[in-house]
Amino acid sequence: TKIAAQEKALLDLVNENVTIEEPNDSLIKNSFSIPGGLKYKNYDKNKSENRTTSQFVLATGYNNLVTNNMVANSQFGYGRSGFYEWGVTWNTRLSNNSNLVHLKYGAGFMYNQLHATDNRIFADINNQTVLVDAGVETKAKRTYFKNVYFVVPMHLEFDFSKTKMVDEKKVFKSHTGARFGIGGFVGVNTNSKQFIEYEQNGYKFKEKQKGDFNVNDFTYGVSTYIGYKATSLYLKYDLNPIFKNNPVDQNNISLGIRFDWN
């Protein structure tokens, strides 16, 4: 009985502090406040976004190496070698009166994986990183080489989202139509690891090797994407080779799907 009385008193207190404003012209604002500082506001779609917005970015797809300007006849499995990338971007509209051109920049992490074919693994021989036979029968799907980079991407983005007119004012929204971006990235290698898994004499072995593997400390490259709303087809290519001292340069290339969530 005492709890019921307190609940009724609390409900009456909340009702006394609820305020609702009727729609006014193009702006609809419903708001209410509860004692203690909690406040909620909801604006309609007729209000422009801020000139700079932020997005969470997630990308994933296939990864491989370009050798002698070719991806064909690669030493790495096309379906098994992959990449993923995540981070945060900021998207700034460059014009006061147009929604077409944006500058997109941010920071994140890039993970590039390579699954060698024919039961091979990477080895450091005379300061060169080469593929050698593993010496045991490895599990192909669970034996791979991975590089992790902290990257700063920057793109010039063309956003073809429609611009509405409300009360003779333009309302700008991004990521609601077709988009195209072109630019690049710079980054630093945070770690390189090789994972080897195999069975021998009835026992399962998992080995993790961590070292520099003569991987370049820094990376830089070009990237582009094209898509609709939050989803895009994404392509990136490293302009510098993955290894420092190898006689033949091999450059990382990735193709996949990218999501930019406002």
Image: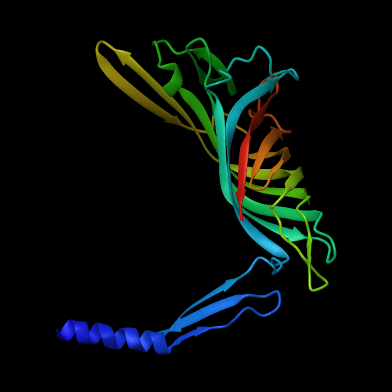
Location of residue 53 in the rendering, given as x and y in whole percent from the top left corner: 67, 61
In this view, 88 is above or below 187: below
Q: Residue at x 65, y 30 (%)?
A: 255
Out of 228 and 12, give the one closest to the viewer.
12
Number of callouts: 0
In this view, 213 is above or below 36: above
Q: Residue at x 52, y 31 (%)?
A: 146
In this view, 169 is above or below 117: below
Q: Residue at x 60, y 27 (%)?
A: 63
Drawn side of residue 144 relative to residue 173, left or right = left
Out of 22 and 151, give the one closest to the viewer.
22
* Snapshot quadrant of residue 131: top right
Residue 240 visible within the image = yes
Out of 13 and 243, give the one closest to the viewer.
13
Location of residue 124 in the rendering, given as x and y in whole percent from the top left corner: 53, 22
Drawn side of residue 11 relative to residue 98, left or right = left
* Color encoding of the figure: rainbow
Residue 112 visible within the image = no
Location of residue 117 in the rendering, given as x and y in whole percent from the top left corner: 53, 13
In this view, 255 is above or below 79: below
* Snapshot quadrant of residue 27: bottom right
Location of residue 18 in the rendering, given as x and y in whole percent from the top left corner: 46, 84
Name, please, the residue furthest toward the left.
1
* Quarter occupied by the N terminus: bottom left
Drawn side of residue 20 relative to residue 137, left or right = right
* Snapshot quadrant of residue 235: top right
Drawn side of residue 17 relative to residue 159, left or right = left
Out of 167 and 38, give the one closest to the viewer.
167
* Quarter occupied by the C terminus: bottom right
